[in-house]
Amino acid sequence: MTKETIIIRNAGVDDIEDVYNIENESFDSPWNYKNILHELNLQFSIFIVACIDETVAGYAIAWQVQDEIQLNKIAVKSNCKRLGIGKRLMYRIIEISDPPVTRVFLEVRESNAEAQLFYQKLGFTTTGFRKDYYKTDNAILMERRLPADEDQ
C-alpha cells in the first residue's frame, strides 16, 4: 500500500456505513449514523473520504462559512494510520474550499496528545481552552491561518 493508492473523493450514501464504523472505532463520543448521513445534505458541509482499493480508510467532515473552516471530524482506520491519510484529508479540505479559506479551526481533547501533535505538525497553534467541553475531558482550541491562495 502506497500513498499513490489513496484516493480522496466526496463522500456518498454508500460510504456512510464505513464512516460510521471508523467513527465508532475512533471516538469515545461518536456521532450516530443519522448525524453522519445528515452531513451529506448540508450545503456548507465538506464531507470527504480517503479510499484504498475502493475501501474507505478515513474521512473528514468540516463546515465552511465564508473564508473559514471548522473541522468537525477527521479519522483514519487504525490499520491504515501512518500512511499520510489524515494529512491528505486536511489538505484536500483546504484545497476544495470555495471561496478559499484563510483560517481553519478545530477542537481536540486535552488528553489526546497524539492528535494535538498531528495538528501542530500541520501548522495549527493553540488558541484557547474549553473546560468540560467533552463529557469526560476539556478541549484545546486550535487554529491554522493561511493565505487564501496557499498551495498545499
Image (spheres, grey):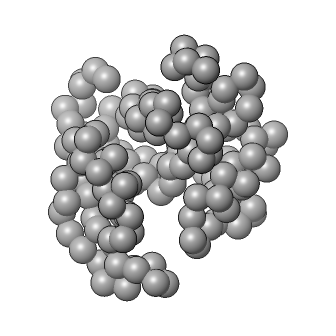
Taking depth in this image into account, of 77 and 129 the one nearest to the observer is 77
How many numbered marks appear? 0
- Image height of 77 relative to 3, above or below: below
Quarter of the image with the N terminus in it: top right
* Residue lying at the far top of the rendered structure: 4
- Image height of 139 relative to 59, above or below: below
- Image height of 58 relative to 53, above or below: below
Residue at (74, 32) in percent of width and height: 55
Quarter of the image with the C terminus in it: top left
- Tell me where residue 123 sits by quadrant: top left
Q: Can residue 105 be spotted in the picture?
A: yes
Residue 150, image x, y percentages: 24, 25
Residue at (28, 65) in percent of width and height: 141
- Tell me where residue 34 sits by quadrant: bottom right
Taking depth in this image into account, of 124 and 68 the one nearest to the observer is 124
Residue 104, image x, y percentages: 31, 47
Residue 130, image x, y percentages: 29, 78
Residue at (19, 32) in percent of width and height: 147
Residue at (31, 42) in percent of width and height: 67
Q: Can residue 65 be spotted in the picture?
A: no
Residue 51, image x, y percentages: 65, 29
Whether residue 147 sits left or right of residue 51 in the image: it is left
Taking depth in this image into account, of 143 and 24 the one nearest to the observer is 24
- Image height of 62 relative to 94, above or below: below
Whether residue 48 sits left or right of residue 136 in the image: it is right
